[in-house]
Image (cartoon, helix red, strand yellow):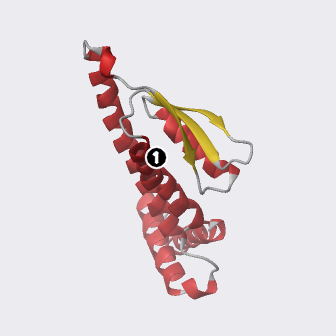
Amino acid sequence: MAFQILLNFFIAVVWMFMTSSLTPSTFVIGYIIGLLLIIMTRRFFPGRLYIWRLWSALKLTAIFLRELVLSNISVLLLVIKPDLSSIQPMIFALPTELEQDWEITLLSSLITLTPGTIVIHVSDDQRTLYIHAIDVDDVDEAIDSIKNTFEKAIMEVSRG
């Protein structure tokens, strides 16, 4: 993936020198030409095109922002609600399929950055995350929500 990105930038810079124009618009045109060349020669590159991983990273960012806004609203409603007896804080275990250290760190960070949840421990074998949530009605639903949003998106970015 890194080789493809560097090659694309190199083609864009070569295009700028070939046209004798060092403007940002010339670089963008060269970048698009480089991307098209890489797409046409993609069978010579191992793995998927880097553009798909970038797309997956953008989707992960959008998922996080959506979850951030929704959880902020739910925590705000919990805070301004006068009856706090209906809140059900809970600690639950989240089994994960992620293998790399950076994947587990990213998942833990995304969970912790989302208001109302925090990762309090990662098991020694790094297969289980222990999460505290401020208000959980159904543990299985909370686990499925995390697995189907953050974990799935991280796997798309890392494993392409």
Please say whether residue 34 is visible from this viewpoint. Answer: yes
Q: In which quadrant is the C terminus drawn?
A: bottom right
**Residue drawn at (51%, 75%) of the image:** 34
In the rendering, at what x and y percent does residue 136 appear? 39, 33
Which one is in front, 76 or 65? 76
Q: In which quadrant is the N terminus drawn?
A: bottom right
**Residue drawn at (39%, 26%) of the image:** 88
**Residue drawn at (45%, 58%) of the image:** 24
Please say whether residue 23 is visible from this viewpoint. Answer: no
Left or right of 86? Residue 47 is: right
Tally the numbered discs.
1
In the rendering, at what x and y percent does residue 14 appear? 58, 72
Which one is in front, 60 or 14? 60
In the rendering, at what x and y percent does residue 131 appear? 54, 35
Left or right of 138? Residue 90 is: right
Amino acid under disc 1? Ile
What is the quadrant of residue 79 in the picture? top left
Residue hosting label 1 = 143
In the rendering, at what x and y percent does residue 124 appear? 74, 43
